[in-house]
Image (tube, grey):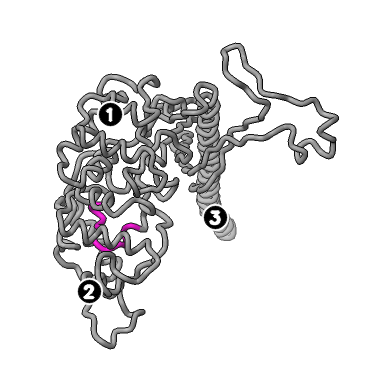
Amino acid sequence: MRRPGAIRTTAHARDQRGVIMILILWIVVVLSVIATSLAFDVQVNSKLARLQHDQFIAYNLARSAIAVGMNHLQNDLLIDFQENPNQPCDALSDVWAQPGLKEGETEIQLGEGTYETMVTDEESKLNINTVSPKIIKAMLEYYGYEPPDSDDIAAAIIDWRDQDDTVSGAQGDKENEKYSALAGQKIRANTAPEELIYQCRNEPFLTVDELLDVYGITPELYHGYDPDSDEAREQKIRNDIAMGKKVTETQKEGGGRGKRREGLALKDILTVHGNGKVNLNTASREVLTILIYAGTNCTNMESATASADSIIEFRGSEKRGRGPDPDDAFRSVNDVAKVSGVSATALQAIGSGGGSNAPGGGGLPITFSSNMFCIKGIGRARNVKKTITTVVQRTLDTYNPDDARLVGNKSRLERKERRPHRSSNGKTEDNYVRIPAIRVLQWTE
C-alpha cells in the first residue's frame, strides 16, 4: 500500500510533465511559424533577386537592340555613298528597315533572353511644326473633319505654334479669347488674360502629344479609336472624373469629330523632328494620300488615295505579296512618273515640290533620303520586358586628313600631297575620310 506522500509526489511529477509537454508544443509551434516566415522571406528575396537579374538582362538586351539599329543606319549610309554619292536615297528595302517594322516580327535569341530592333524613318511623317496650313487641312479632312471645321482646327494648330496672338485668317481676333469661347467659357469685358481656360503656347511643338492640348483635337482622333464604342465612352467618363470635370454626353468639339479610319492613327503620322520634308520612299499610305490631296487643292480624296496606293504598290509591300525592291526606290521626281495609276494632277503636285527647299512652300515638301530615325529596342528575359526608344540624327562626317588641325604643326611641304584619282570602277575618289555618325536627340526608357 502506497503512502500518501508518494501519491502526491507522483501526481506532482505528472503535472510537471504535462506543463513541459505543453511548453514544448508551444515552442514547436513558434519555431514552425518562424521557420515558415524565414522560408517565405527567402522565397520572396529569391524571386526579387531573380526579377532584378531578369530586369538587368532585359535592359541590356534593349540597349543592344538600340546599338544594332544604329549600326544598321551607319552601314546603310556607307553603302549609299559608295553606290551613288550624288543621289542618295533611303527606302524600306534598306538594311535598317529589315529587322522589322512591327513588334514581335523578329526576336533574336541572345544569352538568357531575346532582343528586337525596330527602326522607323521620322522623315516618313509630317512635321507638325513646319507643314503648311493646306497640308494640315488635308490631314484633318482625311481623318473625317469637314469644312469649315477643318479650316478652323487647322488655324488652331497654326496659332498654337506661331509667335503672335492673332487668330490666323481673322482680323483682330485674339487667339486665347476666341478658343476659350469656343471651348465654352463665357468671356466678359473684365476677364483677365490669365483667367482664360485656353492658352496658346505660341512656340513650336515640343512633342506630338502636345497636339492634344490644341482646340478641336480629340483623344479619339489622336489615338485612333471609335468614339462611339462603349469602351471609349467609359474611358472618357473616367478621364473627366479624374480631371474634376462634369460628366456629360460627348460633345463635338470644333463642330465635328474625326471618323474612325483603318490604318495609322493621327499620332503615328506626325513628328517634331527633321527638316520638314517627307521621304517619298518611306511615307505611309496615310501620309502619301494627305500630301497628294493637299497638292491637288483638296479636291478629290478618292483620287489621292488611289495615287497613294499605286505608289505603295510600285515600291513593294509585304502585305501585297511583294517585298520592297531597292531598284524601285525613288531617287528623283522623274522616277515617280514611272508609276502607273498616279493621276496627272498628283504627278504635277509631286513634281512642283520635288525641288522646293522651303518646307510647305512652293509645292509639296518631299525628299528621297532621310537623316532622322526612331529606333525602338525591346529586350525580354523570362517574363520581363524592357523597351528603349531613341530618336537619332544620322550624318556622314567628312574630314580632310591634310587639315593642319588634324595632323598637328607639320608643314604642308613635309607631307605628301594626295590628289583625287580614279578607281578600278571608273569613279573619282578623293583622300577624304568619311565617318557615319549617329547623334542621339532623344532617349526614352
The front one of 400 and 116 is 400
Q: Can you identify the residue that label 3 sits on?
A: 23
What's drawn in magenta, residue-wise?
A: 211-221
Q: Residue 261 location, x and y as percent?
A: 19, 43
Counting residues from the start of the chain, the first of labels 1 and 2 encountered is 2
Vertical comparison of 107 with 136: above or below: above
The label on residue 312 is 1
Please indicate, yes or no, whether residue 118 appears anywhere in the rendered image: yes
Of residue 114 and residue 384, the one placed in the foreground of this image is 114
For marks 2 and 3, give the CA distance.
80 Å
Q: Position of residue 354 (x, y in %)?
A: 36, 37
Residue 1 visible to the viewer? no
Secondary structure at numbered mark 3: helix
Q: Where 4 falls versus 67 (above or below)?
A: below
Between label 1 and label 2, give the one nearer the viewer.
1
**Residue 93, percent from left and from top:** 40, 24
- To which residue does mark 2 refer? 181
Residue occupying image coordinates x 41% and y 37%? 121
Q: Earlier in the sequence, mark 2 or mark 3?
A: 3
| Structural crowding at the residue carrying mark 3, measured as other residues with C-alpha within 10 Å and reported as few (<14), some (14–19) or many (≥20) | few
Label 1, label 2: how many angstroms apart (C-alpha)? 43 Å
Residue drawn where x is 59% and y is 37% of the image: 437
Three-letter code for the amino acid on which mark 2 is drawn: Ala
| Horizontal arrangement in the rendering, residue 15 relative to residue 144 (left or right) | right
Q: Secondary structure at mark 2?
A: helix
Location of residue 31 in the rendering, given as x and y in whole percent from the top left corner: 55, 50
Numbered tag placed on residue 122 in the rendering: none
Task: Report the Cα–Cα distance between label 3 and label 1.
Answer: 84 Å
Residue at image coords 46%, 32%? 117
Residue 324 occupies quadrant: top left
Are the residues tagged 2 and 3 within 8 Å (C-beta)?
no
